[in-house]
Image (tube, rainbow, N blue to C red):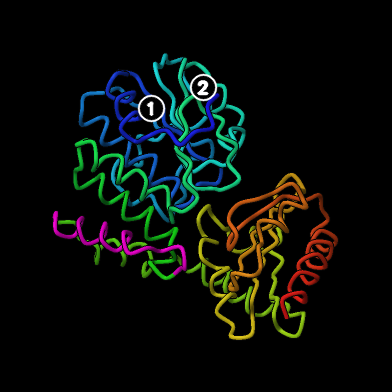
Amino acid sequence: MSAQLTPLSEIATALRSAQRIAIAAHVRPDGDAVGSVLALALSLRAMGKTVYALLEDGVPSNLAFLPETATVLSPPYADFEIDLAVAVDTATHERVGANTVTALGRAPLLINIDHHPTNPAYGHLNHVDGAQPAVGQIIYELLHQNDLPMTDGVMQHLFTAISTDTGSFQFSCTTARTHEIAAEMMRAGLDTARLAQLLYQTQPARRFELMRAMLNEMELRADGRVVSWNLTQALMQKVQMESGDTEGLIDTLRMIDSVVSAVIFEELADGKIRISARSKDSRLDVSAICGQFGGGGHRMAAGARMKGPITEAAETFLKALEHEVRRIA
């Protein structure tokens, strides 16, 4: 498998040559994952391709308003045949989920499009650009530069992908090109105000129950420079939490003026603990800390999974994090 940065023109040629294509992203998909999968799927469908959009965990409820989310397939998958497979926004092949790995394996060619620096280039064609703030931005350039269809539905997904992964254009990864792309889509007629309202100003009451619990239970340490919260199964069941309800909660914790790192520990149904870590200081690389526990991601946003119970996992991780935070004092 090639580790080179495959030109987008070469990827476009491969897409044009295939008729039956499967596109997938990581488990527990966020806005960039869903938006990138469906933007590419809708563009290729507009070309007359047969496209299977695959998400192991389906579309989270907070993104169900987007165009054609009902066409996304989840396991068990039918026994379809494909000429080409595409994995987007997925740092390792296994992160698409076991069933989806098998489904993508039916294709003789795998394209890997990502922006996670830890991605080992597991595709036959790889476009992994860690300088890009969102995979949605890469997909936009793929379509734009190669004259692939850019319908309103495609743009809705691209805007969602880019906006959510840049913290609504606030994170340091946001580039001038990011803003230019948003402007180009607005000039093409995209209603960004409507999308922003649906993405950021339309939330279920149960999300605020989660936020209330988080603000009551959060823990500050390292002289207020580290903030964390333990999200338990008991609380999830109490508020009847759905997928997508926690999206962005960690950014609320990161707003505290003294904080340089925020972490949420989430108790999964299988007893493992999902860790989401964020940094507010470029000197603090949370992907390196998550790497100590088998995880990874970006310098300012990363994750990992550890064995439970949640209190022990949290304490172990926070000790490692606090050690690094004190080094940059």
Highlighted magenta segment, given as a residue range:
171-188
| Residue 28 or residue 150, whichever sits in front | 150
| Left or right for 119, reference 310 | left
Magenta stretch mostly in which secondary structure?
helix
In terms of sequence position, does the residue under pointer 1 or pointer 2 come before the other? 1
| Residue 310 or residue 159, whichever sits in front | 159
Type of amino acid at the residue the image marks with label 1: Tyr
SS at mark 1 in the image: strand
The residue depicted at 64 percent of the width and 80 percent of the height is 259
| Left or right for 180, reference 209 | left
The residue depicted at 83 percent of the width and 56 percent of the height is 309
| Residue 226 or residue 99, whichever sits in front | 226
Tell me, for residue 262, which label it has, or none.
none
Q: Is residue 179 magenta?
A: yes
SS at mark 2 in the image: helix
The residue depicted at 37 percent of the width and 63 percent of the height is 175
